[in-house]
Image (tube, rainbow, N blue to C red):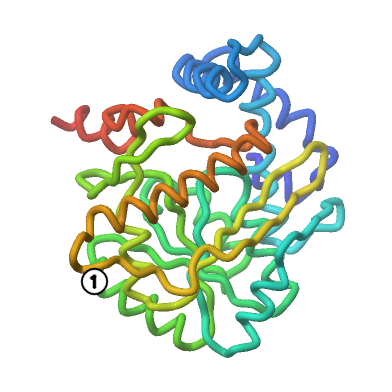
Amino acid sequence: LMFRMAQLLGRTPIKPLVMMIAMYYRLTDRKAVHASRSWLTKVHGTPPGFWKTYRHIYTFAQVTVDRIFLVGGKTRGLKFTRNGDHHLAAQYATGRGAVLLGGHIGSFEAMRNGGNDDNIKINILGHFENAKMINELLTRLDPERAATVIHIGDDPVGQMARVHDRIEAGDFVALLGDRTGLNERTVEVTFFGETAHFPAGPFLLASLMKCPVYLTFGLYRRPNQYDLSCEPFAEKLHIPRKDREAGLQDIVQRFADRLEHHARLAPENWFNFYDFWNNERTPEASRARHHR
């Protein structure tokens, strides 16, 4: 329904509906509210009130709806600020692609929109089993989008070869480095002063590509602005053979530090609505326990 109304009416007229939907979840979704309160308490040091939690959920709702306009190219009512986009432009000029690392914070579609302005082709790699409906709808808006979404699925080795080919062809491949999957190898690092588990896969894959790695984020600012940022992370990710675990942990810790920096800049853009510091509480782990 939101998809249809967004196409028909545009961003501003449906804003009240987005606010109502966010309020519905604020009043009824105890798990989301608990996760939001825990997160905001960790960031600010004090428990948030009703409206701070509501604004967190509303930000997620608005960013989700904005994907419709970003994919459909209807960005007239949106503003973008860019910081560090010259890094991508310089990399694009070399003719070889790179890996773009981000997290479940803000909007990756906004980052793709920024790349399209410079004719940079950005592919997104990840697990999309939990978002089939929204991805099908977005593909209907932009049929060419399907060719730039790489599903890991049940063939990670084959997809790794596909990623390599796209990077060699000059494309950019974006992946998120902050959420672990079912039975996935993890790395224990410090995040917001506590132990957290980050996935090893994105960093191992980036090291195998032997190409530059950049950190990219698109933070939403009310009412209609996205702050896009890009910063170099490594010319090549090198994991030493002698002490691979320590080398990998150092890389992931550096990522976690930068993710924390950007999360502090815009706490309401944090979209991991579960207990991030307890690996058993991830959506994938919870679903596995339910099936067992």
Q: Residue furthest left?
A: 292
The quarter of the image holding the C terminus is top left
Give the residue displayed 47% in from the left and 66% down from the top.
149
Q: Is residue 241 depicted above or below 1 in this figure?
A: below
Q: Position of residue 170 (x, y in %)?
A: 53, 85
Q: How many marks?
A: 1
Displayed quadrant of residue 158: bottom left
Using the image as rendered, state which of residue 161 and residue 77 is in the foreground: 161
Residue corresponding to mark 1:
157
Q: Residues within 10 Å of mark 1 (few under 14, many from 20)?
A: few
| Image position of 192 (left or right of 262) | left
Q: Position of residue 50 (x, y in %)?
A: 66, 10
Using the image as rendered, state which of residue 200 and residue 67 is in the foreground: 200
Q: Secondary structure at mark 1?
A: helix
The quarter of the image holding the N terminus is top right
Give the residue displayed 46% in from the left and 45% down from the top.
256
Give the residue displayed 46% in from the left and 54% down from the top.
176
Q: Residue furthest front?
A: 242
Q: Position of residue 105 (x, y in %)?
A: 57, 43
Q: Position of residue 24 (x, y in %)?
A: 61, 19
Q: Amino acid at mark 1?
A: Val
